[in-house]
Amino acid sequence: MRLRNIPRAEGVIREHRFVIKRPEDQKGCWKQVFGNRNPVYIEIGMGKGRFLLNMAKAHPNINFVGIERYSSVLLRAIEKFDTEEFCELKNVRFVCMDARNVEDVFAQDEVSRIYLNFSDPWPKARHARRRLTSVEFLARYEKILCEGGLLEFKTDNTELFRFSLEQLEEAGWPLECFTFDLHHNEVMNQGNIMTEYEEKFSSKGNPVNKFIAVRK
């Protein structure tokens, strides 16, 4: 996907009070960042922020960290946060970084849940290691999730979903539950908060896949 560069994005990110500028300095200290001992949930590839912000609004006793690699995309999430609907939230922080460095930013047992929503499928076989559900990334998540911590993944790409289920098995991660049609699964869809893309895609009647896996 070709991303439009927004020149002002870097400046907004640099100045915003809820963007963590040197996240590696906070490793092991995220409870101090938020000023409480609530669980820390992270979304990797948060896009425009709809999911993260609505989750934070619905769950004020959980701390949410949104990770986005691209500054022009993160800008949109920050702008959404600064609207009247979300600007009073205290349990949100943003980080602009590559997900490959996640273990440099969070310590072992520091994260209770990881969300991956509609991640880049990297369809070419030679790029499989870049997929956020590959065994390489699962190894990274294992280093930061607490015992019993959860990984939640949603995608409209069924081929990627099947690949992800295979990677979980290869890595030895137990599956708590999964579905190939989230919005018609009464149990798993309960309390589901949609991303921008999920709403657009599902409105056409297309199925969404989801799994919840437990750190091995």
Image: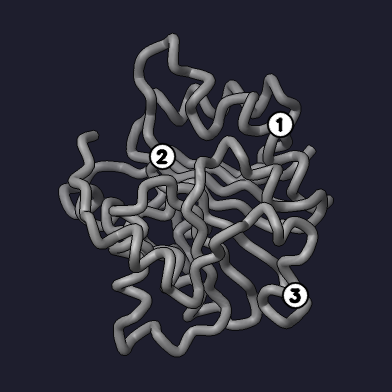
Circle 2 Cα neighbour tier, 10 Å, few/some/many (<14 / 14–19 / ≥20)? some
Measuring 58% from the left and 82% from the top, which residue is drawn there?
A: 60
| The N terminus, quarter of image | top left
Q: What residue lies at 50% left-to-right and 47% top-to-bottom?
A: 97
Image quadrant where one finds the C terminus: top right
* Residue at the spot of label 2: 119
In the rendered image of this protein, does residue 138 appear above or below residue 117?
above
Name the residue beneath numbered marker 1: 139
User: Closer to the N terminus: mark 3 or mark 1?
Assistant: 3
Residue 160 lies, in percent from the top left, at 42, 27
Crowding around mark 1 (Cα neighbors within 10 Å: few <14, some 14 to 19, many 20+) is some
Q: Amino acid at mark 3?
A: Gln
Q: The residue tagged with tag 1: helix, strand or loop?
A: helix
Q: Earlier in the sequence, mark 3 or mark 2?
A: 3
Residue at the extreme top of the image, as rendered? 126
Q: Secondary structure at mark 2?
A: loop
Is any part of residue 50 visible from this angle?
Answer: no
Q: Which residue is mark 3?
A: 32
Kindly indicate whether the residue at mark 1 contacts the one at mark 3 (C-beta within 8 angstroms). Answer: no
Q: Provide residue 75's location: percent of width, then percent of height.
A: 32, 62
Give how far apart the Cα atoms at labels 1 and 2 are.
17 Å
For disc 3, the neighbor class at 10 Å (few under 14, some 14 to 19, many from 20) is: few
